[in-house]
Image (cartoon, grey):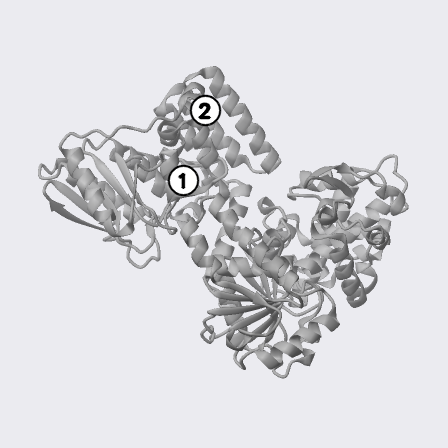
Amino acid sequence: MSVNAFTTQVKDYVARVELNLPGEPVNKITRGVRDEIDGLLSELASDAAVRAIVLISTKPDSFIAGADIDEFVALRSREEAHELVRKGQALVNRLAQLGKPVVAAIHGACLGGGLEVALACTYRVATDHPKTRIGLPEVQLGIIPAAGGCQRLPRLIGVRNALHVILAGRQLAARRAFRMGVVDELVHPAILDQVAWEVAARLADGWRPKRRRRGVAGLALDRNPLGRRVVYAGARKQVLKRTGGHYPAPLAALKAVRHGIRYGVEAGMDMEAALFAELAVGDVSRRLVQIFFASTALKKDPGVEGEAPPPKPVRNLGVVGAGFMGSSIGAVAVLQAGVDVRLRDTDLPSVARGLKAARKILASRVKRRRITKHQYLRLERLLSGGTGWEGFGRVDLAIEAVFEDLDVKHEVMRALDRHVPDDCVIASNTSTIPIERIAEVVGQPNRVLGMHFFSPVERMPLLEVIVTDQTASWATVTAAAFGREMGKTVIVVRDCPGFWVNRILAPYLNEAGRLLEEGVTVDAIDKTMTKYGFPVGPITLLDEIGLDVAQKASEVLYEAFGERMRPMAGLARMTEDRRLGRKSRRGFYRYEQGERRGVDEAVYEIIEAEIASHVPRGDIGRRLTYSMLNEAARAVDEGVVRSPRDGDIGAVFGIGFPAFRGGPLRYLDDVGAAQAVETLEQLAEEYGERFAPCPRLQRMAAGAERFYPSA
């Protein structure tokens, strides 16, 4: 089946093969592409006029982004998966054994199967450009590189470096890929075509490039079986620490690498195929792929139903409040969106601290070699600040990021209403206060919405855009579009106390507080939930959020929702004792020099708890998990999120709900509404009415319904 993805031109014995998959935003390896390249390789191998080949993409910013995930999703059995991967292996092996040198000319995404194609080439030239990303991200979809990636990459850059790339699914910037030896040469995008052709011509004339040496330590480890065992053991330990054993793909990739190094490439590829087939039809991979598709769909979602108006371009951003959140928002806006940012605070020392914090975030990217020093200087010039309203008269979007106090926010909103243009979107970064109340003092409430960023802004991927009944569509699409420019996954949420993420998080944290007051230890609570799959336990999370912030949020939610959102009484006593968590170096845990040093035993006296002799871990896990699940179902019923998809993405990206479980709503579907209702009724009988199953779950149980019509 031909898809007309390839065009070939021959000049001076060098064939220039252009790849551009019609009708797709990126190049990917579909069945049609495989069939077409198979025939093309036959022609090139037999053509005496061709002595070398350049493989290049004419698709903007995309070499080959990977395999076609739709084909992967359609797999229904191990046998189908095994057959699919064997076809891919055969094609890549054929490229590697063509008998004529092939140069991969890489610009843009070179990921997964795309990198495996490049690894099968003789030489790799890549552009030194931010859009060029190189890696094997398969483990993030619950599978492994299975077209030779687990075999060729270790042999090219060494076992230790290859495991670093493969086991975490890392995407490398072009410079880092060059330093590691994944690519052979870096060039400016303008001369990629020319340099690749010149290299191919030299290869055709018999030139053999020298591979860069990996260093004495790397060679010693790779060539020494005992050294390799040390590397494998260390890699396994790191994987288990990072995943808690919940994600089988990284360990499977480690097994494929190890098997291939010990028994040879062919045996290694046999192992790749077998492991891929097992993982591809497993539950974990299915859930991770569903999350991938959901987050990909959100990148194209304007945030409103029906025909969406065009978003207003944001070229100038105003941020009121130069504290931790405000400075971070400003830095990320500069770094990702390249806009002019004006920070405002009430005094010059606060402004100076905010600008310094923003510059520190930019500088960290230089240190990690994500941007150059020249780029840093250019971006830094986009940041400015002051105590007045200078510059706010031309902003397209203004975000208030001041303290969680309604009176303070009203004061800021009144000022913004006076100083920003009439077509400027006004946003609040509040985490819990209803936007409708914040917008009360604004003359045009239709341009007011919430933009709830998560801390730390530079690392957390989620943004909640919160809309009221009055928020105009143009304001919504503008905020959502700018959030995506900032690199965020955006969900649009209906206004209510706590919105979506904090609304479903609050009962989970409150229940953790009740467990503490009942005498369950901090360690027991946190370890139970990390074993369940959360990245950190609820008590650790409270310390990270800040106990003062958590207390303020809990008061808002308790006022709105009553007894089921009652916070732990000990939280107020903790803040009175100036135990605010990590930021004050005292919370439920002790901190020294920025490092956590263990539970502070004094907290049990402060919260007036006596250590219980024994509490079943099952009860801890059920109480914490089902408090969140029940509230999630209730919030969906109230229309807080636009779809279960958005709710699950919000929970996974905003809270760290275990991705391998698919999100709280997908997990409820897996458990079954009837079983969830039964569990909640048992918990309600034993622990109180706050666990009474919400009406939505009761209706779903009665009608055998699901949040997602199909699994």
Amino acid type, label 1: Arg
Q: Nearer the viewer, mark 2 or mark 1?
A: 1
Which one is nearer the viewer's eye here, 1 or 504? 504
From the image, tell me which residue sits under label 1: 176
Q: Where does residue 361 sit, x and y in percent of width and height?
A: 54, 52
Please determine whether, in this image, residue 66 is positioned above or below residue 388: above
SS at badge 1:
helix
Which residue is label 2 attached to?
Answer: 258
Q: Is residue 296 left or right of residue 608?
A: left
Taking the spot 40% from the left edge, 40% from the top edge, the residue there is 176
Q: Position of residue 320 (x, y in %)?
A: 62, 68
Q: How crowded is mark 2: few (under 14 residues within 10 Å), some or many (20 or more)?
A: many
Q: Quadrant of residue 641?
A: bottom right
Which residue is drawn at the image coordinates 53% and 58% (left, top)?
Answer: 331
Q: Which amino acid does label 2 sit on?
A: Arg
User: Can you see residue 235?
Assistant: yes
* Element assignment for label 2: helix
Q: Which quadrant holds residue 465?
A: bottom right
Q: Is residue 644 visible?
A: no
Q: CA–CA distance between discs 2 and 1?
A: 24 Å
Q: Is residue 146 above or below residue 109?
A: above
Q: Tell me what residue is drawn at x 73 percent, y 52 percent.
A: 546
In this rendering, the answer to whether 433 lies above or below 584 is: below
Q: Is residue 37 left or right of residue 86?
A: left
Where, by quadrant of the figure, is residue 665 drawn?
Answer: bottom right
Q: How many circles with numbers are drawn on the protein?
A: 2
Which mark is first along the chain, 1 or 2? 1
Work out whether residue 413 or residue 358 is closer to the camera in this orientation and state it. Answer: 358
> What's the mark number on residue 501?
none
